[in-house]
Image (spheres, grey):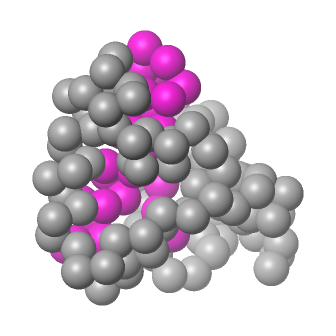
Amino acid sequence: MGTRNYIRRESALHSELEALRWAMENMLQHSTCQNFGTNCKDLIAMINEPHAWPNFATELERIETLQICFLDFKITHIPRAQNQISDSLARTTRSFHRKLYFIGCSIPVWLPGSSLT
């Protein structure tokens, strides 16, 4: 799991794409992970049908380029209610007023409610 706090983008979908790009780049460097999860159904639709989303062409081209680096790239929908830890991590990260990067395979101790296993 990982997180990074970004400045606000043009839309929530731009932010979702930026977060996926960051996660993919980091997994290529730090892990053999091939599977990604999101609670954003539109993000999955964008990945599956990039030509249907012309306003996001630049961002989607970057994602397509990264996908080539993965042998078996998969992105699946995970409802927010079933992914409380990642949701809490994202909400907490947005509250930081300085740069924050986190990549790890365990729940960070600084995460409020980190006993949500």
- Magenta highlight range: 1-29
**In what quadrant of the picture does the C terminus appear?**
bottom right
Residue 59, compared with residue 31, is above or below; it is above
Number of marks in the image? 0
Q: Is residue 21 magenta?
A: yes
Answer with the quarter of the image where residue 24 lies: bottom left
Answer with the quarter of the image where residue 95 lies: top right
Residue 59 visible at all: yes
The one of 79 and 98 positioned closer to us in this rendering: 79
Q: Is residue 97 left or right of residue 41?
A: left
The one of 116 and 72 positioned closer to us in this rendering: 72
Residue 21, compared with residue 95, is above or below; it is below
What residue lies at 42% left-to-right and 50% top-to-bottom? 48
What is the x, y in percent for residue 87? 70, 53
The one of 25 and 68 positioned closer to us in this rendering: 68
Residue 117, compared with residue 43, is above or below; it is below
What residue lies at 51% left-to-right and 49% top-to-bottom? 44
Residue 45, compared with residue 84, is above or below; it is above
Q: Is residue 91 left or right of residue 67?
A: right
What residue lies at 48% left-to-right and 54% top-to-bottom? 3
What is the x, y in percent for residue 85? 72, 64
What is the x, y in percent for residue 93? 57, 44
Answer with the quarter of the image where residue 26 lies: bottom left
Q: Is residue 114 magenta?
A: no
What is the x, y in percent for residue 92? 66, 46
The one of 30 and 115 positioned closer to us in this rendering: 30
What residue lies at 34% left-to-right and 17% top-to-bottom? 55
Residue 89 visible at all: no
